[in-house]
Image (cartoon, coloured by chain):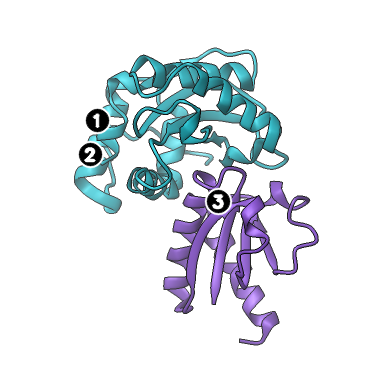
Amino acid sequence: MKILTVCGAGQGSSLILKMNVQDVIDEIGLDADVDNSNISTAKNSGADLILAGEFHEDALEGFEVPVITVSDFMDNEEIKSKIQDFLEEKGE
Amino acid sequence: MISEYLTKDNIILGAEVADWKEAIKKSGSILEANDLIEAEYIDAMIEMVKDKGAYIVITPGLALPHARPEKGAKENGLSLLTLKEPVNFGHSKNDPVKVVISFCAADDSSHTQMLSELAEFLKDKKNVNYIKEVDSKKELLAYFKSYDEGGESNEDSNSMRSRSGQ
């Protein structure tokens, strides 16, 4: 599974989100690669899941890849529960 | 080490600013004073918010302004600015902002270690809350040092102020 974290520039917020997503998937034992990028390159990244700030919800609309948005990038509990919800829905 | 990136020269506490733009300017001026950026980088940080929005408010009360390396970043670096009165950046949930941590990156990858250490530090809400409240730079520098020495389990009971109501 390939997870992509995105933000406007692709080097600040998305990097921090990537680190926290990595912590979360390590914790729940999900086998996934996490990478970060900016929004414009995210569209054709081939990712299975995109995580971004709620702020980017509109910009990510219309993406074929499932998108999870979080409001607090530093809140691993929020990230964890949203990823778990996603996995449950996906049936894994 | 947080204390390596945030030194007495990179920190301003309790600044008074009129709005988010002034907050970024002030925060960016610390980077400039430390010769980490060209002046144009500050405008680029402001443009970034105008252009892409206030997503840089990554957690309640804390903004992380930055611009692309090619906008005048000379080296990797951080600055910390806290505001006497918080200002809104335009984020629906994480406003108002009390803490502004600007960073500059010399390229796309070498700042990873710096941000990783910053993220580790900010992940503990106790640390974020401490920065929001601290008004003594000396105390804050001691807090960073003690965090670096003690790692995550650092309790820091001596300089930690009361967090009642948090």
> How far, Cα to Cα, is label 1 from label 2?
6 Å
| Within-10-Å neighbours for mark 2: few <14, some 14–19, many 20+ | some
Give the label, 2 or 3, closer to the camera: 3
Chain painted purple: A
- Judged from the image, the secondary structure of the residue bearing numbered disc 3 is loop
Query: Which residue is denoted by mark 1 in the rendering?
Result: B142
The answer to whether B92 appears left or right of B165 in the picture is right
Percent position of residue B68, x then y: 51, 35
The three-letter amino acid code for the residue at tag 1 is Ala
Percent position of residue A11, x then y: 50, 45
Percent position of residue B152, x then y: 30, 52
Name the residue: 34% across, 31% down.
Answer: B75
Name the residue: 53% across, 54% down.
Answer: A75
- Along the line of sight, the residue nearer the viewer: B33 or A46: A46
On residue B146, which mark appears?
Answer: 2
| Within-10-Å neighbours for mark 1: few <14, some 14–19, many 20+ | some
Q: Identify the chain of the residue marked 2, using the numbered disc in the image.
A: B
